[in-house]
Amino acid sequence: MNEIELTNEQLDALRALSEEEIEDLAAALDDRVSKLCAVGIYGGLQ
Amino acid sequence: MERADRMSAVERCTTLAIKALLDERGKARYWDGVSSCPYATACTLAAMVELDERFDPAMRENAVAYLIATQRQNGAWSLGVAPGEQLPITAHCYTALSMYHAHFEKTGNKVLIEAIRRARAYLDRAFNFLQTFDVNVQHYLASIVAAHWLAKIYNIPLLPSALENHISKILADYEIWIAKSPEACVYRTPAEIVHLACRPEVSRLCELQTRQLENGSWNLQQIDSTSLALITIARQHGSEEVLRRGCNYLRSSQNADGGFPEFAPAELCNTIYVGFYFSDVCWRAGIALPTWLHNMQSWLYQSQNPDGSMSISRWSPGDGDIDDTAWAAYWLVKGLNEDLNTPQLHAARAFLEHAQNDDGGFPTWPGRPSAVDLTAHAYQGLLALGSDESILQKAAKYLRLRQFEDGSWSAMWNVSKIYGTTQVLMALADNYQSEPFFHSGVNYVLQSQGTDGLWDTAEETGMALYVLLLLDSSKYQAAIERGMEALVDTQHGGYWPEKCKWKGIFSYTTRPWALTPPIAACLAYCGKVLNGTNLNRLLDVS
């Protein structure tokens, strides 16, 4: 999962949201976004 | 706890809950209340702003107060049940409050302005996320087409320009779809109505007006469709009579908390669910239904549609669905001991049988994709109606193939896997309880019990306990005792803390749905485990 790299803009967009908000949005989108969000939550943001 | 004390505590809990359930009935002695939801309230507030002179200002003020009271800490609104719901619900609430503010509150209302500011901040964060990740969001943004249209009319900035194209594309796709098959456009969704609103055409306006239901609403009494239809008709100078009836419907739909439900009334849907559960309890216990359900027999028959189906409401006769038809049939056969050869039950059976899809499953409405919960209910209804073995076996096979590895099933209309799993187990208990897949389902239920004895909510706890009590309850005694103790301990004044898991923006989050499964579990426990309780006495509280 951590092999995927997020851009700085993507990290900033994720940081602006709470974990719950990210999960809510990601749940409505496709698998690729869910994976990116998971990287954000469990990788890039920690 | 001593047996006598336990019996007394469970009986008291049961009596209080039944009293609470009966208190929830309306004047006509059935359950017609539906709870409010922010999305529906926002849509109605928009209509009340647009059609301002037709509504009492207090109605708007109460709707605004409801929206402010239900805003979450993060500035968004949600029901906490559907994935991705925060953005679409918040977009509608933000737009409606901004419309109200622009139209009526020019002097400034600090609480309202703060609510709008917080909503805007959430939307900015969410839209920025969608843009930055460069994902295909067209499908998702289809859920905010109505908010986008209303925002445009009132000059409220909603979407960042980079996302605007998606909305144009959605409406353009509708144009192509409608041009190809105009008969398919039945103004079912907000997007279809908005499409008409954006591209006025007299024949389409007439078509929309003719689709108004007898009680003044549109499309399953849905508030969003009704509000958008009324705004469209008013802006296109449509029929005054249609507007009058539509506004009357909205006026009659506001709840005491100031909010609006997504659809109302849902008197058949609510009442049939109660009748279904109690019929199963009483039939298995070998006792008669209480008079407050027994006396509804003629009302039930009068509510049946000509095609044999039942709808969520008598106001929506063209929308007979599988759940309501199956539950009503079960109530009539098991609860009221009706003759299977009556024309009404023949018609109900034919409606259900014809709705079976090629995959063996059943949909919500005929012709739609199959789902687990609908198939479980159809199976149970058709089993009671004496349907052919081949139909039942196909349905059971469909259910077996949809079981997850952990033994659970997912439902279409409730996010709880306990709901999905218990509905399948209830349906298949009489014919399949010795099968390994059935044991796996029961194990899932057992393993899902929390350390506090509950299955998250009291509603789910009731569903889980009721299934365990249907089976050989001595095998699951420890789980049953812990669950019953938790139910008794967490009840206050006949009610349990509520947490809605019914799906989507459709807010049939009514108390009868939350109360019925725990009561069924309490009654089954009193009858099977305590074995000495007079169930008729508990049920006869009216």
Image: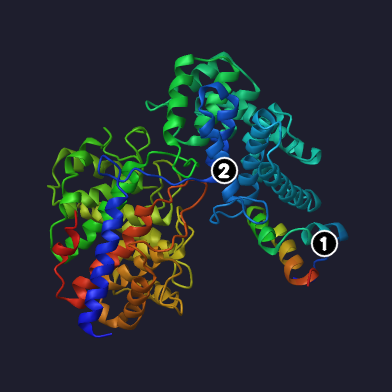
Residue B65 numbered tag: 2
Q: Tell me if B283 is positioned left or right of B426 in this view.
A: left
Residue A11 numbered tag: 1
Residue B143 seen in the current view: yes
Q: Measured from the top left, where is residue B310 in percent x and y? A: 30, 40
Q: What's the CA distance linking mark 1 and mark 2?
A: 36 Å
- Decide: few, some or many residues near mark 2? Use Cα within 10 Å; few <14, some 14-19, many ≥20: some
Chain at tag 2: B
Rendered residue at 68%/36% (across/down): B98
Quarter of the image containing the N terminus of chain B?
Answer: bottom left
In the depicted structure, whether residue B114 falls above or below residue B211: below
Rendered residue at 38%/39% (across/down): B265
Amino acid type, callout 2: Ala
- Under circle 1, the secondary element is helix
Amino acid type, callout 1: Leu
- Between B75 and A37, the one nearer to me in the picture: B75
Q: Tell me if A7 is positioned left or right of B380 in this view.
A: right
In the depicted structure, whether residue B43 falls above or below residue B416: above
- Decide: few, some or many residues near mark 1? Use Cα within 10 Å; few <14, some 14-19, many ≥20: many
Rendered residue at 47%/60% (across/down): B499
Q: Measured from the top left, where is residue A45 in percent x and y? A: 79, 69
Which of the 4 quarters of the picture holds residue B15?
Answer: bottom left
Residue B421 seen in the current view: no
